[in-house]
Amino acid sequence: MKNVRVLIVDDDPAIRKFIRANLEARKYEVILAADGEEGIKAIENELPDLVLLDVMMPKVDGIEVCRRIRTWSEIPIIILSAREGEMDKVKCLDCGADDYLTKPFSIRELLARIQAVLRRTHETEGNVIQSTYCRGDLTVDLAKNKVTLKGEEISLTKTEYKILTYLVTNAGRVITPDQLLAKIWGAEYIGDNHMVQVFIARLRKRLQDTSKESKYIETRSGIGYTIRPAQETINS
């Protein structure tokens, strides 16, 4: 992990010092920012590989930082927050964060989360099925990693695309939340159903699939999710 650069954005100098010391001891490169404005500038100027982002900060809070960054970058963001409420977590994930860790946390847990997010971000999509999923206005080109809706390419985050790909390659099958968590995030996330709910909702919004009568992704109450079978599959 010698070349991984981590930006820590937190207004508490003790937390910055604690995280920095532990990351540098493990050969991470560390950049520091004391508030949201500094954090945004650091992301723009330093282009780190991952951001650890506090929520409650002066000038610009973590939620707004996350929203602004997501307008132009898919850099992995892990939220660090003293708030434990489910709605706080959902709000952070909905603004584009990749993960959420509640303070106080152990360095062991933080390192595990960092490694999991980096693994999801950088893992290659080898052995991709060479076909294109088509249903209605939606086309998913698995070979080119391209999604189009009504003939226009749409932008998905890496996590959203991985969820869609997993559903598409299992079209017609019901996938449980734990299966999605294990496949997309890792086995250590099993049981965190709110994570799945937030990302499925975001994916549906991107696909304009938010009506009561779903065109693509269906929820099977108490079981999981499924994407309707393709109307046409074109082999590459």
Image (cartoon, helix red, strand yellow):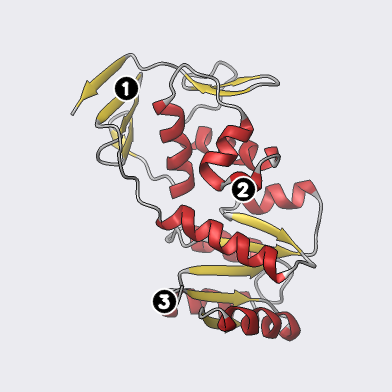
Instruction: Please tell me whether mark 1 or mark 3 is closer to you in this view.
Output: 3
Q: Determine whether, in the image, residue 77 is placed left or right of residue 168.
A: right
At label 2, counting other C-alpha atoms closer than 10 Å, the crowd grade (few under 14, some 14-19, many 20 or more) is some
Q: Secondary structure at mark 1?
A: strand
Q: Which comes sooner in the sequence, label 3 or label 2?
A: 3
Q: Is residue 189 visible?
A: yes
Q: Which residue is mark 1?
A: 134
Residue farthest toward the left in the current orientation of the protein: 236
Q: What percent of the width, then of the height, locates residue 103?
A: 78, 66
Task: Identify which amino acid the numbered label 3 is placed on.
Answer: Asn
Q: Is residue 207 visible?
A: no
Query: Foreground mark, 2 or 1?
Result: 1
Q: Rounded to the nearest whole Å, what is the CA distance between mark 2 and mark 1? A: 27 Å
User: If the image is split into quadrants, where does the C terminus sit?
Assistant: top left
Q: Amino acid at mark 2?
A: Asp
Q: Is residue 164 above or below residue 98?
A: above
How far is the residue under mark 3 from the one under mark 2? Answer: 29 Å
x and y percent of residue 44 in the render? Answer: 44, 75
Q: Name the residue carrying label 2.
A: 94
Secondary structure of the residue carrying numbered label 3: loop
Q: Residue 3: which numbered mark, if any?
A: 3
Instruction: Out of 127 and 29, give the one closest to the viewer.
Output: 127
Indicate whether 74 appears above or below 51.
above
